[in-house]
Each structure stands twice: as C-alpha cells, then as structure tokens.
Image (cartoon, helix red, strand yellow):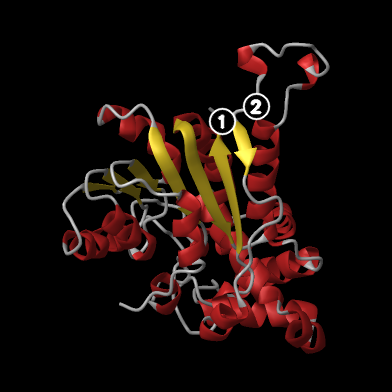
Amino acid sequence: MKHYTVLKKECIEGLNIKEDGIYVDATLGFAGDSKEILKRIKRGKLFAFDRDEEACIYSEKELSQVGENFKIFHHKFSDMLECLEKENIKSVDGILFDLGVSSPQLDENRGFSFMREELLDMRMDKRDTLTALKVVNEYDKETLKKIFYEYGEEKKSSFIANEIVKERKEKEITTTKELVEVIKKAVGAKYFFKNHPERKIFQAIRIEINQELEDLKKAIPNAIKLLKPKGRIVVVTFHSLEDRIVKQIFKKYSEINEMVKGLPEIPEEYKPLLKIINKKPILPSEEELKENTRSKSAKLRIAERME
C-alpha cells in the first residue's frame, strides 16, 4: 500500500525524540511517521490513534516489524485523554498530528476522490452512520450552503446548494462523478475549470461527516495539557481552516493571560504553557513538492511545553 508521508523528516526532528520517551501519533494513517518514531524509542512507548479500521490493521503489521513497544487505538484523536488514562498514562514526551486524508484513502474506493467514479461515502470510520450520500441528498439548502461556505470557503456555495437540491428532486445523487457534474452545472464550465470548486465542496462534505474541526478544537488543548515539561507537539495541516485553529490555540497557550499582564510576578496558573518553536510554519521543500504534489498545501507548526 503506497503512502507518502508529508514533511516526515521535519516532523520527526520537531518531536525531539528521546529513546526512553512516551510518544503519541494522533493520526496513525499507514504508519509512515509511527515507524520512524518506533525506530528511535527502544526503551520508550508509542501510542497511536486512527478512526480508519483498515489503517489500524495495516499499521499493526507494519509496526510489528519494527518493534513491540506500541499500542494502536481504533479511536478518533479527541478520545486521546480517556484512552491514555486507561493505560495509566498521565503525561507524554511528544504528540504528532498529521491531518488530512491519506493517499490510500484517496486512491481507494471510499468516495473521497472527485477524480473517479465512486459511491458517495467519505467516512473515515465505517462505524459512523452519516455519509456523503446522506449529506448531499437529505440536508436542506441552507445547511448545504452553510457547510460549503464555512468548511469549503467556496464563494459560489449558494449556487451549488441550489443546484444540488434541484437535481436530487429528479434523481438521487449517488456517485462522486454525479456530484462533480452538478457542481459544474451550478457554476458554469469557465468558473469550474479555473477555480476547481469541486475540491472545496468535497473538503466541506468530508469535514462535516467526520466532524474534523470540532475534533481538532478539542484534541489540541488536550494534547498540550498531556505534555511533560519540554515535551513537543507537532502539527501538519493541509488547509487554512485547520491551520487557523492550530495557530490560534498555540497562540492562546503561549501568551500570558490578559488579566495578569503587567504584574511584577505572574501566578503559576496564569503562566503560558507553551513556547512556539517556529513562528512561521515550515513548508515542504522544492524536492518534496516534485516528489508529491499533494504536499503543496502542507504547513508544519511545532510548540514545546514550558518547564
């Protein structure tokens, strides 16, 4: 199973791995990052999370060839605190989030890709009941418009929502190609080929189904609180909505609370929890962009827990 891990070298360096440390891969995927972590922690432990059962099964085999000091949870990363608590883990040395859809998910018949004819699905966890089919055919016009505008940042959201509602009255929209054709019809060929709104609409539907942004808003603060002093949090994002959330949370936890700014001595509970390691996000190199075009929107942010 071919999967290219974006900014892998930079992520591993960013974690500042100790061989006896405890690390969390919050987005296991197909074990690209986890294998590199496991190679470096001979006396440590790795805990990994993924909502995709296929990814968990595949990665279990891959990681077993590297070491035995790991445990995989078939859970979303916002369940991290509860899962680690059951393992008696109260703090960790590093946490990695590599967000977005993995290459195998895009390349297999899961309904994530607008490039091929697939059934509308887009669930990262097949145990979930909400699918792209339900969103496209059952959500009302105003809700569709809101999702497309907020999660896809698509300015023609209203036209696309209108056209979907109109088309589905005639016939249920069941495949990715059918949806792409409806989007093209809504915006016109000139706008479609220039701006590729299908990318944004598919992103918006995927975010809605998997509640990606809500999970992220919960998981990042939990991860920060889990870190040991000098522990690192490393996050790779692939679109502006994710990056904005991560940037804002990092900012919040790295600044002195407004209530106590200017005091000669800051009370312990109001001191910043984080130190930002890279003020500007790290971007893929020219070499990486040539190897993998899917990496072009990636941004890496690193922060460290204060002592």
Q: Is residue 107 left or right of residue 241?
A: left
Q: Earlier in the sequence, mark 1 or mark 2?
A: 2
- Measured along the vertical axis of the image, is residue 262 above or below residue 161? above
Which residue, given by chain and number where applicable, does mark 2 sit on? 272
Dot 1, crowdedness within 10 Å: few (<14), some or many (≥20)?
some
Q: For mark 1, give the secondary structure.
A: loop
Toward which corner of the image does residue 106 lie, by quadrant? bottom left
Q: How far apart are marks 1 and 2 (CA)?
A: 7 Å
Q: In this view, does 55 lie to the left or right of 105?
A: left
Q: Is residue 88 left or right of residue 205?
A: left
Q: How far from the left and from the top, in percent, is residue 266?
A: 71, 14
Which residue, given by chain and number where applicable, does mark 1 sit on? 306
User: As shown in the figure, which amino acid type bears the numbered disc 2?
Assistant: Pro
> Can residue 101 be seen in this snapshot?
no
Q: Decide which of 191, 103 is in the foreground and name it.
A: 103
> Can residue 27 be seen in this snapshot?
yes
Q: For mark 2, give the secondary structure.
A: loop
Query: Which residue is pictured at 38% across the width and 35% down the height?
Result: 92
Toward which corner of the image does residue 272 lie, by quadrant? top right
Q: How far from the left and from the top, in percent, is residue 141?
A: 71, 57
User: As shown in the figure, which amino acid type bears the numbered disc 1?
Assistant: Met
Query: Mark 2 and mark 1 in contact (Cβ < 8 Å)?
Result: yes
Q: Decide which of 43, 53 is in the foreground and name it.
A: 43
